[in-house]
Image (cartoon, rainbow, N blue to C red):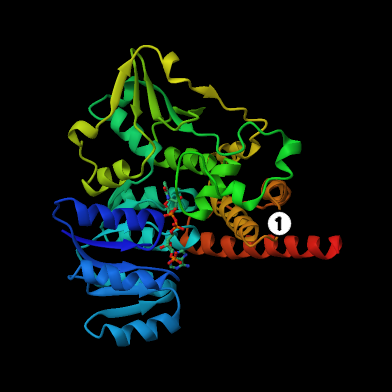
Amino acid sequence: MDLVILGASGSIGSQALDFLKNKKNNWVLKGFSVGKRVNVIDEIVKEFQNVNYITVKNKKDYLIYKKKYPHIKFYYGDKGLIKIILKNKNATILNALIGFVGLKPSIVSLKKDRTLLLANKESLVIGGELINKILEKKGKLIPIDSEHVAIKKCLYNENVSDVKKIIITASGGPFFNLTNEELKNVTLDEALNHPNWKMGKKITIDSATLMNKTFEIIEAHYLFPYDKKIDVLVSRDSYVHGLVIFKDKIKLNVSKPSMLGPIEYALNLGKPLGNEFNDVETNTIEKYNLLELDKKRFNVISYSDFVIKNKGNSGAILNSINETLVDSFLKGEISFIDLTQILNIIMKNSKINKRVSYYNYHKTHYRYMKITRNYIKSRRVLCK
Ligand SMILES: NC(=O)c1ccc[n+]([C@@H]2O[C@H](COP(=O)([O-])OP(=O)(O)OC[C@H]3O[C@@H](n4cnc5c(N)ncnc54)[C@H](OP(=O)(O)O)[C@@H]3O)[C@@H](O)[C@H]2O)c1
């Protein structure tokens, strides 16, 4: 079975490659993308000798590497991410890109009737409505996110009409117990030091603000569109990933925090995985130390309701502002509390439109990126 990995140099992409390397399986890696970390290309090409297509972010890297590997077809830029999907006509696509750039490859993969193994949760946050419309006719989507895979496992062989509530868990991140006053002084390094998970930088910051959980509620809404309540509980050690409350029982999925399980689940095309199916059936969840999430303190959680209720371009607005702010925070331009404070200000003045199209999401993304950047810039001028 042919496979293309988008985002092969990242945290999820490289773990997917490790899985392919270390386990016996039927996958043949035909193509992959990297962004700026082109230094990983040599090792991947050496290990996976059936690779025919590679795409990189920048033209200068494209020019270097296409000379180095004349037997491989190279592409670059956002268009390269689409070409590599189209050229590998039968391939399953594993989308481990981060942020808005992952949306179009997801849409194109499904429109081309492919199976999409989706780590790029921003695709569903921004375009869940469009993606579900496409899925009514074409393509197949299997998530790669620990909470959603946990829920899928809990729902396996169960009747959806027996479900009362779906609950995903949050670790609470590194600052769970800090006061708002204390949050003012946290550093970038502290924000990047997640207590349980080792992930890419952007999702690590999203986990510290709890925006990652906001995104995951939206993601769950589109993955499990059963009109059931989706809620969050805190599992500080990330041992419980998700639970489903049925009319007559509770099912949980538990394991040490690791993305290998969800990656393996997706690469097994969503079929059960023998012993690694860590489902627990119970009548009480007391012993799992699950805590309520203080939704007033972590107010970004309320944006999940905002996006689910408003649909249209509301997810694109939220994602764009957040993506731009996280980028600024990683560059040291704004403080940790600015991430939520500026977001709240710009969200308050945002204007929703209901059009369900990639064009609308794209336009919204760049519009709110500009608004957010201008806001950060004008504030810096005022502070000088
Ligand atoms: N990491 C986890 O444990 C985890 C868990 C659950 C869900 N997820 C989701 O999985 C997705 C990937 O997360 P991650 O932590 O793996 O991110 P990451 O480590 O930052 O990797 C992101 C990948 O995307 C590439 N990329 C970024 N911008 C690009 C651009 N403009 N053009 C082409 N390629 C680009 C990066 O390339 P370069 O680095 O080479 O520039 C890298 O290969 C996210 O949506 C995240 O929310 C991650």
Disc 1, SS: loop
| Quadrant in which the N terminus appears | bottom left
Residue 85 visible in the picture: no
Residue 26: give x, y in percent of width and height: 13, 55
Residue at 37% across / 85% down in the picture? 64
Residue 19 visible in the picture: yes
Residue 171: give x, y in percent of width and height: 50, 34
Give the quarter of the image for residue 185: top right
Position of 127 with respect to 12 (left or right) is: right
Vertical side of 197 occupied by 189: above or below: below
Q: Is mark 1 within 8 Å of ligand 1?
A: no
Vertical side of 271 occupied by 35: above or below: below
| Quadrant in which the C terminus appears | bottom right
The quadrant where ligand 1 appears is bottom left
- Seen from the viewer's position, the closer of residues 171 and 92 is 171
Residue 233: give x, y in percent of width and height: 50, 27
Position of 89 with respect to 143 (left or right) is: left
Residue 271: give x, y in percent of width and height: 20, 39
Vertical side of 303 occupied by 124: above or below: below
Numbered disc total: 1
Give the quarter of the image for residue 84: bottom left
Q: Which residue is mark 1?
A: 334
Q: Badge 1, how many Cα within 10 Å: few under 14, some, many 20+? A: some
Vertical side of 198 occupied by 37: above or below: below
Residue at 43% across / 72% down in the picture? 78
Residue at 42% across / 15% down in the picture? 287
